[in-house]
Structures are given as C-alpha cells and as structure tokens.
Image: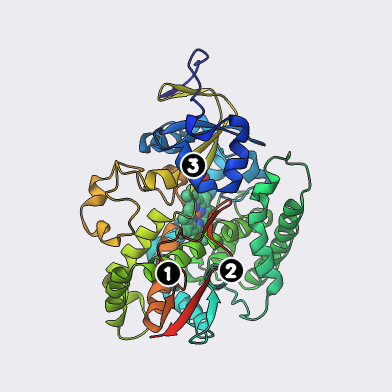
Amino acid sequence: MSSGDGTTTPLAPYPSTLGHPLTHTVGAMRDVFGFRNRAMADRDFVRVKLLGPGDVYHLGHPDHFEYVLLSGRDDFRKSDDFRIAFDEGLVAAEGETWRRQREVLQPLFARDRLLDHADGMVAQVRRRCRRWEPGSRIDLAAETSQLSLDVLFSTLFGRELSIDGDEAIRTAADRLQDWFAPTSYPLPRWVPTPARRRFRRGKERLHAVADDLLAAAATDPPADPSAADDLLSLLVALRESGATPEGVLDDDSLGDQVVTMIFAGHDTTSTAIAFAFYALATNPEVRARFHDEVDALDGPPTVDDLDALDVTERVVTETLRKYPPVYTIPREAATDVTLDGYRIPEGAATWLTVDQIHRDSRFYDDPETFRPARWATDLRERLPDFAYAPFGGGPRRCIGRQFALLEATLALATIGREYDLVWPGDPDAEPPLVGAMTARMVPGTEFVVERR
Ligand code: HEM
C-alpha cells in the first residue's frame, strides 16, 4: 500500500451485483444497508457511483482501515463537508490546529475524570424515564435522543435542560444532522436545500447557546482549572490560566467545539442505547442474564457498581458491533493512492465500511446473531486490529468513546432495573434501522413500557 504515481494502476471495479452504475444512487437511497451488503458481498474494495460525490471507493478490510486511519493517514483528509459544517471544531479541524485542540481536550475525556459525572448521568436517566407510564408506548428513538442531550448538557456544559422546555435547543440539536441529508447529496454544496437551511438555523441557534454558556462560565472561573466541575468551565478556566496554546480556546473556537460535541455525541450515543434495548427485547436469553445482573444491584447504579456490570457492558459492546451508529467513516484522498492493487485518485471520496467489517464471518462467528457472550472469550485478542471499529481508530479515534460507553452502560442498568421495554413487532423481522449520516432507529418506532 502506498501513495504516489499509480496512473497505470487499475481502479476498483463497480460490483456486478449492483447493476449499471447509473442505477447505484437509486439503489443506495432506497435501502442503504441492503445496497452495501450487495456491493461488498464478495469483495473488500469496490467502487460505487453516486450522484453528487461521484465515484466513491468503499473499503471493507481491517488492513484498509489501518492504512487510512493510521499508517497512511497523511494520504487522506476529512471532506469539505465537515469543514463547511463545523468550522474549526475537533471533528473537522486538520493538521496542527487539530493536533493542538486534541491535546487540550483529550485529558478531559479520560475515564477517571468522566467517572465524576456518573451520578449526574444516572440522575438524568431517572428524571426522564420516571415519566413513562407503565402500559404505554414510547417512541424510543425520540426518548433516547432527548436523554443523550440531557446528559451532554448537564455533564459537559453544566446546564440542566428543562425536561419539558428548551425546545429551541432540542430542535436545533436535531437539525445538525440535516447537513448530511441524503436528499441534498446530489446537489452542489452552495445550493440552499431545505435541509441545509434547517442545518444553518440549527447551527446559528447552538452558537448563540454556546455564547451564553461561555459568558456564564467566564463570570467566575475557578482559579484552579482542576476545580471546575464541567467541561466548559474547565476550558474557560484553562484559557484564563494562560496554560493553553494561542487560538485553541478563543471564543469562536470554543463555540465550534460546543456545536461539534452536540453533533458528534448526541445521535450516536442515543442510537446505541435505543438499539441495545431493541436487541434485549428481541433476545430473551440475553435479556434474562441482563436482568439477573441489574437486579443484583442495591439501587440505581453508581460508580462502585461499574465493575459488576459485565453483562451490561457486553450488551453495549455487541450493540455497537451489530448496529454501529457510525457505519461509514468518510475520508477524501489527498493524493493518488494505491491500495490493495487499486488506485484511488486524488480528491476521491473514500468510505470505510464499519458495518461490513462488523458482520464479516472471517472475523466473527455467526455474525448476524446478537451474542454479547462472544466478548467474554478471547475474541478481542484474536481479532485483527481494526476489525472492531465503532469508534474509528488511529489518532482521530472518537474522543468521546469513554463518555459514550459510560453513559450507555449506566442508562441500560438504570432503565433495566425498573422497566422492561417490550418490542411489540415481529422479533424476526428486519430491525428498524435507517441509514443517514449515522444509522438511526426508524423515527416513531414504539416500545411498550412495562414496570418490572
Ligand atoms: C456510541 C457513541 C459514539 C460513536 C459510535 C462515535 C463514533 C465516532 C467515530 C467513528 C469517530 C471517528 C470519525 C472519523 O475518524 O472520521 C468519532 C469521532 C469523534 N467523536 Fe465520537 N462517537 C460516539 C460518541 C461521542 C461522544 C459522546 C462525543 C462527545 C461528547 C463524541 C465526540 C467525537 C469527536 C469530537 C470526534 C472527532 C475526534 C477527532 O477527530 O479528533 N463522540 N466518533
């Protein structure tokens, strides 16, 4: 694998299983997951023609991931989409700007520091699920979406959202995904599609929220940054102490980080929690073991219980394998690249297909089965690097990984002790999964709440 000349190197084939390349866009829009399964049925590296991005190179082997995310990462960059949408936020920044931001932010997401937020996370979960009427139906995706926003705001930004209010913030947060709406894809980025206009309004609103939060945090920053009890006050205190590189924590950049964290940390975690409950509801044996574990707790989970939540943790791990919220990690070739005998031309969209690797029988036995117990074996040691990549990999691996794992584990245990979320549909039918920028539960999918 290398970058460089490559002009005589062939391009990857269009998959014969997909029909004529001009029909690819329609196929992908109709059912993105079925389309990818067909495209990558017998190959790890294919080319797909999509209106908008043009030829998109799909890579589905752990070695490809290793090259793009780690050893050959300088040959790839984030696409302009991220920069246009998130300015200098961590998810979009490149080069030295990204490196300095990551250096400042990384320690704040260390597991030890996040454990201080565990009780706050549990309190947010309890506040929300206490409103569920036994016997009623809830739109689970909507509930977990609100929940993950409640948790983000109360822990990272030090601001508890009103459970029945703060509609403007909640709507604005939902609109961040609209930048990547598939209906806008075929059109040039300057075209103000309705989805893009919704995105812009949402982003402006959240920037205004970020300004208010920053102003509040700046009124009385703790002299010692380590005394700050949320991420935003900590960042403000670090800035005031003069200990950070110039430009990393100015007001604009902090606003970009707030919007980025809402975008990157909201739908992803919420989808993971929703699908964990779907998987529990449709796998009675797993559910029974999960119930045994959470019933053995003395009360709502605390930090001290985390070591006892093995089954719960494995349910989260397996959910992220079978239903990875970030099912594609997108990059753009920064130069002509030769990979596995094929050429990726400079500027070409290059997509790492996380969902395909996670269901590859070369790496996982019986990959279609939801089986958390597989993680109780030596599977992790046996798996090739990058064969499990729900959080990406290399230096740009998800900074919120520990946050998301902690939140999902505590949310499952808190809800699971008190409620059974019953799936009223056919357990053998296709899961209620829809693919946009991230994979999500089909909006409006209902579960019946039963008190345990
Ligand atoms: C289950 C939940 C989550 C999943 C599946 C997930 C997945 C990912 C993935 C795959 C990446 C790498 C993207 C790439 O390389 O292009 C990423 C990056 C990122 N994630 Fe997450 N994420 C989750 C939760 C969170 C949370 C809770 C936060 C923040 C509170 C967060 C913040 C970020 C940021 C800022 C980046 C960019 C990091 C960088 O480029 O240095 N994520 N996430």
Q: Distance between the residues labelled 1 and 2?
A: 15 Å
The amino acid at mark 3 is Arg
Q: Which of marks 2 and 3 is nearer the N terminus?
A: 3
Task: Name the secondary structure under disc 3.
Answer: helix
As drawn, the label of residue 444 is 2
Q: Nearer the viewer, residue 137 or 275?
A: 137
Q: Mark 3 points at which residue?
A: 36
Q: Nearer the viewer, residue 311 or 2?
A: 311
As drawn, the label of residue 277 is 1
* Residue 176 at least partly seen: yes
Residue 223 found in image quarter: bottom right
The amino acid at mark 1 is Phe
Task: Name the secondary structure under disc 1.
Answer: helix
Tell me where residue 140 appears, x and y as whole percent.
Answer: 52, 71
The amino acid at mark 2 is Gly
Quadrant location of the C terminus in the rendered image: bottom left
